Image: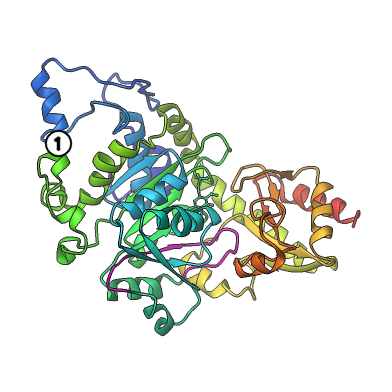
């Protein structure tokens, strides 16, 4: 689709382009397999000599059209869908890392990503150095080693709501000749397109705002096409030297700017198989069609709720990067001037038990393990996602024991505030 279209138009029109007489709505290719006239044709697909579909574990047209839409929203050159955000982050890193390699990881990334890298991928022989994203350049520089292959961070961290200083991170990653991978789940391409600031790879948990209705777990990886793998060929040898599992194909030679996503698809998806179901991609596409309408409303509502909370005497603190005076307000204005996200966090005077009791009295906002849903939802990380940790460990992870993660939905903001107000009466 024309690059000239605005992001609103891309949300609706990108991906599926029916030809004369074809179905108007994105078709669901609910099939595991694809038929060919000759064995030779199928063989060429297996050798990557010809483009085409042969088995849905590798590629499916419905999935690909939705990936194409997300690719255009982010302004990348190639994209792929995965069955979850976890799979997206795993593939994004594992596509360029192997046993003996090293990753520089922002300390405030989502807990699932943190565990993936520091526990599970550690067992695969990949080591991490954890950095505070607010550290100065000198400190960040010290985290790099000769075997460092990438830097991983989030544009807006879940749940710490730290806004990434893209310029600082891009500069440092590139100075060390490695790509910067950014999880853009909370900001979405509506509010922030990391490639515009030099980020190399973007990942998403599409489960969140992109789906927006808590229907399907899913993920996406988008490549900017800008990182020069060949220039550092030795370091990224998986992309620049022959892949024996495809009769010696060299991804950078054969696929140019699409090398990274092609390798992730034909190698990692082939071997690990975290493909989304075409039905889920169809539902994700419906979510994407209203992303540009929902995200601004989430942000508008979140700002109203955050401002109201700030004025309430029972509230101890409020964290929302859209609030003037917030530590990340300036960075948010610089990188996402139209809004940040719909998630806020706050604590109540009286601490942890008071926070829990308040949540139990909410009527509209539901207690769920989820964020970024059209419906307002709430979670107490210390009792839920981080419940194995004691107070000290919680603080180290950047999660205050009284922290309430409040994901503001797109209902009427006054109704959300009224719900909070009535629940506060009980504490
Ligand atoms: N990245 C971020 C920022 C998240 O918030 C989440 C989940 O909450 C994930 C990745 C993991 O995504 P999923 O739950 O779709 O596997």
Q: Which residues are magenta?
A: 145-164
Q: Main secondary structure of the magenta part?
A: loop
User: Is 77 located above or below residue 230 in the figure?
Assistant: above
Residue 239 in magenta stretch:
no
> Is 358 left, or right, of 203 in this rendering?
right
> Is 86 left, or right, of 408 in this rendering?
left
Quadrant holding the N terminus: top left
User: Is 234 located above or below residue 358 in the figure?
Assistant: below
Measuring from the top left, give residue 355's x and y in whole percent.
80, 58
Q: Residue furthest bottom?
A: 138
Of residues 72 and 247, which is closer to you in this image?
Answer: 247
Residue found at x 47% / y 68%: 164
**Helix, strand or loop at mark 1:** loop
> Within 10 Å of the Cα at label 1, are there few (<14), some (14-19), or many (20+) other Cα atoms?
some
- Reading the image, the residue beneath label 1 is 48
Measuring from the top left, give residue 276's x and y in whole percent.
41, 34
User: Is 50 located above or below residue 222 in the figure?
Assistant: above
Residue labelled 1 has its Cβ within 8 Å of some atom of ligand 1? no
Total marks in image:
1
């Amino acid at each position: 689709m024309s690059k000239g279209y605005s992001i609103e138009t891309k949300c609706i029109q990108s991906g599926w382009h029916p030809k004369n007489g074809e179905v108007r709505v994105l078709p669901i290719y609910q099939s595991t397999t694809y038929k060919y006239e000759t064995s030779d044709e199928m063989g060429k697909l297996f050798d990557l000599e010809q483009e085409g579909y042969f088995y849905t574990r590798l590629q499916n047209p419905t999935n690909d059209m939705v990936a194409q839409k997300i690719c255009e929203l982010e302004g990348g050159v190639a994209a792929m869908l995965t069955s979850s955000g976890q799979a997206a982050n795993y593939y994004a890193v594992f596509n360029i890392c192997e046993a003996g390699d090293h990753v520089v990881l922002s300390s405030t990334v989502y807990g699932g990503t943190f565990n993936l890298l520091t526990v599970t991928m550690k067992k695969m022989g990949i080591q991490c150095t954890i950095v505070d994203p607010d550290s100065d350049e000198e400190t960040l520089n010290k985290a790099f080693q000769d075997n460092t292959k990438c830097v991983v961070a989030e544009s807006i961290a879940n749940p710490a709501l730290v806004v990434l200083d893209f310029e600082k991170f891009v500069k440092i990653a590139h100075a060390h000749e490695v790509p910067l991978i950014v999880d853009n789940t909370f900001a979405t391409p509506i509010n922030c397109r990391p490639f515009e600031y030099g980020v190399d790879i973007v990942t998403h948990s599409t489960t969140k705002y992109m789906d927006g209705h808590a229907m399907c777990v899913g993920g996406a990886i988008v490549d900017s096409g800008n990182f020069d793998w060949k220039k550092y060929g030795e370091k990224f040898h998986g992309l620049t030297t022959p892949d024996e599992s495809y009769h010696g194909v060299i991804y950078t030679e054969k696929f140019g700017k699409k090398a990274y996503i092609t390798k992730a698809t034909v190698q990692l998806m082939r071997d690990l198989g975290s493909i989304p179901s075409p039905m889920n991609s169809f539902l994700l596409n419906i979510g994407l069609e209203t992303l540009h309408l929902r995200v601004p409303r989430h942000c508008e509502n979140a700002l109203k709720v955050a401002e109201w909370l700030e004025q309430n005497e029972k509230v101890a603190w409020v964290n929302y990067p859209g609030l003037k005076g917030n530590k990340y307000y300036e960075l948010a204005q610089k990188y996402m001037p139209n809004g940040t996200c719909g998630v806020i966090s706050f604590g109540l005077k009286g601490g942890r038990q008071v926070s829990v009791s308040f949540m139990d009295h909410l009527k509209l906002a539901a207690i769920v393990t989820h964020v970024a849903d059209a419906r307002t939802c709430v979670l107490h990380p210390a009792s839920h996602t981080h419940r194995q940790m004691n107070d000290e460990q919680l603080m180290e992870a950047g999660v205050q024991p009284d922290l309430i993660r409040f994901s503001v939905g797109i209902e009427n903001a006054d109704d959300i505030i009224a719900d909070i107000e009535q629940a506060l009466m009980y504490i």
